[in-house]
Amino acid sequence: MAVWPASLPPLPAPMDVAVQDAFLRSDMDTGPGKVRRRFTASAVFYTFTLRMEGSQYADLMTLYNTTVDFDMNDPVSGNLEQFQFNAPPDARIITGAPANADRILDVSIQLKKIP
């Protein structure tokens, strides 16, 4: 199993954390609506931005392009969990440079913790 590269910067705070809604709600003609579980486990979504060097971005893109699932410590619990990219990393060049290692980028990352 692939792992989150140790070469990347530590995960930042603040970070957006959203839990998938596991309930299905139905309105009734009369009386209260009904609620039932759609599934037993909910995915958790993490969205954050990391500032990194060009070589770190290359490591991140290698992970994105070569694996579907990878292991990483959960930013909330600290436990080793399985994650997937929920969207391709979105990079913004902050400081351009001829050498890749000298570039600075802000990279927006969306991850999904697999339940």
Image (tube, rainbow, N blue to C red):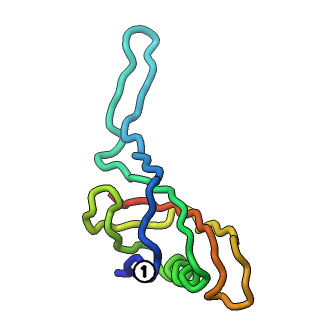
Horizontally, is 108 left or right of 114 in the view?
right
For the view shown, which residue lies furthest in the top direction? 30
Quarter of the image that includes the C terminus: bottom left
Residue at (46, 54) in percent of width and height? 15
- Where residue 84 appears, as percent x and y from the top left, is 44, 67
Horizontally, is 81 left or right of 91 in the view?
left
The kind of secondary structure element at disc 1 is loop
- Where residue 102 appears, as percent x and y from the top left, is 64, 86
- Where residue 97 appears, as percent x and y from the top left, is 72, 84
Identified by mark 1, the residue type is Pro
Q: How many marks?
A: 1
* Residue 71, above or below 114: below
Name the image quarter holding residue 6. bottom left
Q: Which one is in front, 93 or 108?
A: 93
For the view shown, which residue lies furthest in the bottom direction? 99
Can residue 24 be seen by looking at this rendering? yes
* Residue 33, above or below 57: above
Name the image quarter holding residue 91. bottom right
Q: Which one is in front, 106 or 65?
A: 106
Residue at (70, 75) in percent of width and height? 95
Residue to which mark 1 is pinned: 5
Q: Residues within 10 Å of mark 1 (few under 14, many from 20)?
A: some
Residue at (31, 49) in percent of width and height? 41
* Residue 76, above or below 31: below
Q: Which one is in front, 42 or 105?
A: 105
* Residue 41, above or below 89: above
- Where residue 62 appears, as percent x and y from the top left, is 53, 83
